Image (cartoon, coloured by chain):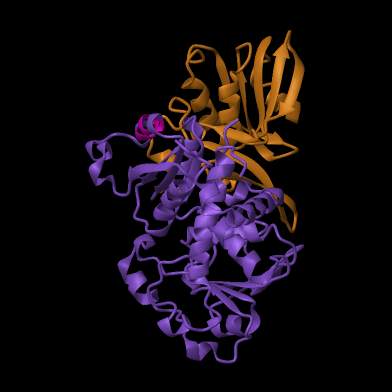
Chain colours: A purple, B orange
Amino acid sequence: MKRDLISANELTSADLAMYLELAGRVEALPSERKRMLLPGRILMAMFFEPSTRTRLSFEAAMVRLGGNALGFSDIAGTSITKGESFLDTVHTVENYADILVIRHSREGAARVAAEASRLPVINAGDGTNQHPSQTLLDLYTIHKLFGRIAGLRIALVGDLKYSRTVHSLFKALCLYPDVEFTLVSPPSLRMPAYLLPGGSRPQASETVVWTEHRVHETAELRQAVASCDLIYMTRIQKERFPDPVEYARLKGTYRLDAHMLRGAAPTLRILHPLPRVDEIACDVDATPHAAWFEQVANGLIMRQAILLHLLGVEP
Amino acid sequence: MTLDHRVEIIPKIETGIVIDHIPAGLGPRILEVIRSTPGLQGVVVSLGLNFASTRLGVKDMIKVHTGDLPDRVLEHLSLVAPGVTIKRVRDFAVDRSYTLAPPRVLRSLCRCRNPNCLSNHEEGVESRFHAFEIPSDTGELTRYRCAFCERVFSLQELDIMPLESA
């Protein structure tokens, strides 16, 4: 049976542990050994939406494992502009590759492709829904930074309504015991209720305790800086806003700078899925809190692990 | 007039299906579903409205002179009027009776309410929702997750497709 990576919703604790362990083994391999793992295999990057890191890191991951990468990063040069359907495009390009990596502006696109194609499919982002490879690299980074994930106090900050990276990560983090969440967002960009444990948001309460997780919702970032082990910043995503006026009102709501981090615990770490716009000032880069470029480096490793697992190759 | 006498206003059927305990007012909608189903347009159907009911207070009732209702129709009815009673009648006697509940997987029965879900835009993609339970103050509530965009809906929030296009 073929394997896909579509949603954090279907990953189990055992799956997460497997991916973290596999990424650790991949990282330890010498480069020349890695190049012998996927010779002749072809990755098809189908990016119906713009991307820098995700597409390039998947392509680099495949090339460094000895394979090749093809694809498109803009529908302008494809038959989609002639009216070809998404499924016809999938059925066409699956003849040219061994694995599909798909980013699309509509939720559910990767699932539709996975159910239709005989090839393994990786969801590289579907609308505001999921971004599971980002989640796995985030978890790998957190585990490397802290030596554990269970029991951490984690703040998710910014656009919690539309951010697929946050939606995926939150679901996956809920599989680790005793993780304490602080959800920091403007009221109009709160985490959708259907993603909360229990599937709904109790009224008249800022802090909700479920069996294993304490979830605190606030609009105040300073409190998270003072009380958390990890801050996961996100960009207010212009491209997701139906109303540009609403975007203009909310952009720049949160900005972390070195001054704000004065007095923070030395062990506090900050991650960001990137690209950042203005939510983290450049003066934070030089502080020991900054870990987002380490996160980018881990992305390549984790995406190699994902390719190897889905293609059934043991490193 | 007793309750039994009121029910007998609709003649007994020798063979067929009785749809009972229909919340008052929903009877005509169910009749519409039956009459739009290929193979059922010509069958004899009796509809009764506003009978007294010990369970519902007031109810509608439908009797269909047919062997069985197709599974597809029953699935559709389970969304239009969950909780109605289906009674299969043979030789003027009820030989099977059950409460109609929505299936755990809804295939091509509803459209996703998320306008950005690909299932609403791609021809050939069959909509699909999977049931799951969430805790609530009053026990458990059933919710449905779109298999594609993963949004979660209550049964009342789902957009039921007309039977002929489902």
Does A98 sit above or below residue A182? above
Q: In which quarter of the image is the N terminus of chain A?
A: top right
> Magenta stretch mostly in which secondary structure?
helix
Q: Which residue lies furthest to the front in this view?
A: A32
Please say whether residue B47 is visible from this viewpoint.
Answer: no
Say whether residue B20 is magenta: no
Does A287 sit above or below residue A48? below
Q: Residue B36 at x, y = what percent?
A: 46, 22
Number of marks in the image? 0
Q: Residue A4 at x, y = what percent?
A: 55, 40
Does B162 sit above or below residue B9? below
Q: Quadrant of the C terminus of chain A?
A: top right
What range of the chain is rendered magenta? A89-94
Q: Residue A243 at x, y = what percent?
A: 33, 65
Q: Which residue is drawn at 33% across and 74% down?
A: A248
- Given residues A125 and A219, the one toward you in this image is A125
Q: Residue at x 62, y 41 (%)?
A: A314
**Residue A202 located left or right of residue B137:** left
- Given residues B89 and A23, the one toward you in this image is A23
Q: Residue B129 at x, y = what percent?
A: 57, 39
The part of the image, by quadrant, that contains residue B84 is top right
Please say whether residue A154 is visible from this viewpoint.
Answer: yes
**Residue A129 located left or right of residue B62:** left
Does A299 sit above or below residue B16? below
